[in-house]
């Protein structure tokens, strides 16, 4: 989806923010871009084209800008994406993604252009995202690039943890520390 400045209201329009659980948001991911006003799919929108599939969404520069709604990351996850690739992410969107298990991979503008070029030539183009080694690879060409991720968030993603799960994984250490403190 080589569109720049995709904001959170485009990712999930405000009228769908009534729910407080992370369920059902994928149906409304890019709702106004995916569907006509009568609810029929727009055939020219990329997510409505069965030729494109997978768990990685490649988006243009400044993906996730706009308001800080968590629902944008929830809708990306609920739709089935587990990774979003862009040359720049809004900080809050990036953190919201990592908090729920979506890996935001920030690449150089040149690498992102290469992805879009290859996918345009062959929609079956595959990307491999290696979180432990922090590398993204274009399978067809072997071209790869490293990406940065905070070590705490990387650990959580690798272990399927959110912040509470992380603390719970250290429960014994926390209890031992607490018992060693004077009251």
Image: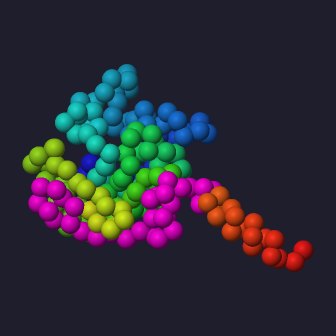
Image coordinates for residue 93, horizontal then vertical, percent: 47, 57
Q: Is residue 55 left or right of residue 118?
A: right
**Residue at x 25%, y 56% (from the top left corner):** 128
* Residue located at (38% from left, 36% from top): 32
Left or right: where does residue 21 sit relative to residue 78? right
User: Is residue 21 positioned above or below 132 on the image?
Assistant: above
From what the image shows, is residue 131 above or below residue 29? below
Q: Is residue 47 left or right of residue 69?
A: left
Question: Whole-percent x and y of residue 151?
Answer: 47, 71
Camera-side residue of 149 and 62:
149
Of residues 29 and 97, the one nearer the viewer is: 97
Which quadrant: the C terminus? bottom right
Q: Position of residue 54 (x, y in %)?
A: 28, 43
Residue reaching furthest right?
A: 183
Up-down: is 54 above or below 166?
above
Q: How many marks?
A: 0
Q: Is residue 86 visible?
A: no
Colour approach in the figure: rainbow
Q: Quadrant of residue 61?
A: bottom left
Residue 19 point in image, percent of width and height: 59, 36
Find residue 28 and report its image quarter: top left
Q: Going 36% across and 65% down the picture, which residue do you hit?
A: 132
Q: Residue at x 23, y 34 (%)?
A: 49
Q: Which residues are magenta?
A: 137-166
* Quarter of the image where one finds residue 42: top left
Q: Taking the image as drawn, is residue 36 in sight?
A: yes
Asked whether 164 falls inside the magenta stretch, the response is yes
| In magenta stretch: residue 147 | yes
């Amino acid at each position: 989806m080589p569109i720049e400045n995709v904001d959170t209201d485009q990712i999930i329009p405000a009228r769908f923010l009534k729910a407080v659980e992370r369920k059902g948001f994928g149906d409304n991911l890019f709702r106004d871009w995916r569907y006509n006003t009568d609810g029929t799919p727009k055939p020219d929108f990329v997510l409505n084209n069965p030729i494109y599939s997978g768990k990685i969404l490649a988006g243009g520069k400044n993906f996730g800008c706009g308001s800080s709604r968590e629902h944008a990351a929830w809708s990306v996850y609920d739709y089935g994406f587990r990774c979003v690739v862009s040359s720049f992410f809004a900080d809050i969107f990036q953190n919201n993604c990592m908090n729920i298990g979506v890996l935001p991979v920030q690449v150089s503008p040149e690498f992102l252009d290469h992805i879009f070029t290859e996918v345009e030539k062959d929609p079956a183009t595959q990307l491999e995202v290696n979180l432990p080694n922090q590398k993204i690879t274009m399978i067809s060409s072997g071209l790869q690039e490293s990406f940065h991720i905070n070590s705490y968030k990387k650990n959580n993603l690798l272990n399927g943890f959110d912040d509470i799960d992380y603390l719970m994984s250290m429960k014994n250490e926390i209890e031992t520390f607490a018992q060693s403190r004077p009251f």
